[in-house]
Amino acid sequence: MPSEPNHVLEFPGGYTRSTGPVIGRFLTELRAGRIVGVRTAARKVLVPPLEYDPATGEPTLTTPDQTSPEPSYDFVEVGPAGTVREWTWVEEPRKNHPLDRPFAWALIRLDGADTSLVHAVDAPVKAMRTGMRVWPRWRSDRVGSITDLECFVPEVSTIVATVRTEYTVTPGAALARYLDALTREVFLAGRCPTCESVYVPYRLSCPQCGSVIEEELEVGPAGTVTTFAINNLPDPRAPQVPFVSAYILLDGADTPIIALLSEIPSDQVTEGMRVRAVFEGGTVKWFAPEREA
Ligand SMILES: [Zn+2]
C-alpha cells in the first residue's frame, strides 16, 4: 500500500478556508445533508464543485440557454453513495484526522459525479478494496463544513435484503404513522438502536448506519430555530409575504424539520429562538414563538 500522500492531509483545512458562491453552496448543502457538484460546459459533474473546470480552465459559471441569459452555476445533487476508486490505509491517525482509529483515505466517485472526492472510510482494513460501495455517515449537528460528512462507511451488504425490504414495502407506513400522530398533536420520532440518533419524521431505518428502527418516541412540540429564510415570493402554502421558513430542531430530536414560522414579524426571527408548534385541522399550521405560560 502506498504511504499517505501529502495532498490528502491538507484536505479538511482547504475547504474551511474557502468561500465564494460555489464552495458556499457545497457547504450549505452539506449542512442540509446533501452533496452537490457543479456541471461544466462539457457536461461533466465536478465534486466537490469548483469555480473553474480543471480540465479546460473554463469557468463553470455557464449560460444554459438563450431564454435565460443570466449565467449561473448548474448544481447537481450526487450520491450519497459512491464507489472507492483508490485508497490508502492510515494505521496511526493523527490529532486532526477525522477518526481516532485506523481508517482509509479514499478517492470516492459519488454516483452521478465525474470526479472523485477525497474522504475517510471507516472500515476494517480487510474490508477495504477498490470498487467497494460506500455511503456517507453524517454528523447529527451539521454546521456547513466538510466535516459534516464524518466519513464514509461500507454499504450494508450482509443484511441488505432486510433493509431494502423495509424501505420498499413500507415507505408509506412510517409517514402514515407520523401523519396519524400529528392528528393527535404529537410529533412521532424514531431512535436508532445502534447510533441512538433520533429522527423526525419517524422512519423505519437509520440513514446513517442502516439499522432497523423500532423504538418510537415523542419529540417537541417545542423546539429551537437552527436556521431560517425570509421569503418574499408567495408560496401556495404561504400566500402572504414575507413569510419565514425555518429549520426547527424539536426538543429530543437530532434532525431538524422544516416548517413555517409565524405570529412574529419576520425581522424579529433569530437563530436559537424557542418556538412551539401550532396545530390546526389535524396537522401543523405553523410554529410560533414560545410564550411564557
Ligand atoms: Zn443509526
Image (cartoon, rainbow, N blue to C red):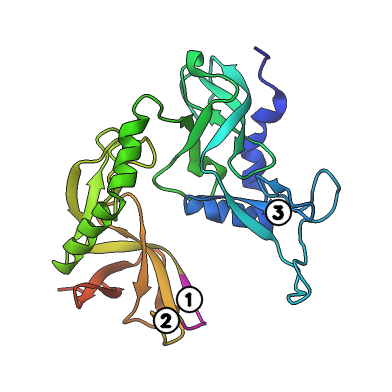
Q: CA–CA distance between discs 2 and 3?
A: 31 Å
In the image, 99 versus 129, the foreground residue is: 129
The quadrant in which the C terminus is found is: bottom left
**Dot 1: element:** strand
Q: What span is in magenta?
A: 229-234
> Which amino acid type is marked by label 2?
Pro
Q: Residue furthest bottom?
A: 240
Q: Which residue is mark 3?
A: 39
Amino acid at circle 1: Ile
- Give the answer, above or below, for where 106 lies relative to 56: above
Expressed as whole percent of the image width and height from the top left, the position of residue 205 reads: 31, 42
Q: Amino acid at mark 3?
A: Arg
Which residue bears the numbered disc 1?
Answer: 230
Disc 3 CB within 8 Å of nearest ligand 1 atom: no
At horizontal 31% and vertical 39% (from top left) the residue drawn is 165
Label 3 – label 1 distance at C-alpha: 28 Å
Q: Is residue 130 left or right of residue 102?
A: right
On screen, residue 12 above or below 50: above
Residue found at x 24% / y 70%: 277
Q: Position of residue 122 (x, y in %)?
A: 47, 26
- Give the quarter of the figure containing the N terminus: top right
Other-residue count near label 2 (Cα within 10 Å), few / some / many at <14 / 14–19 / ≥20: few
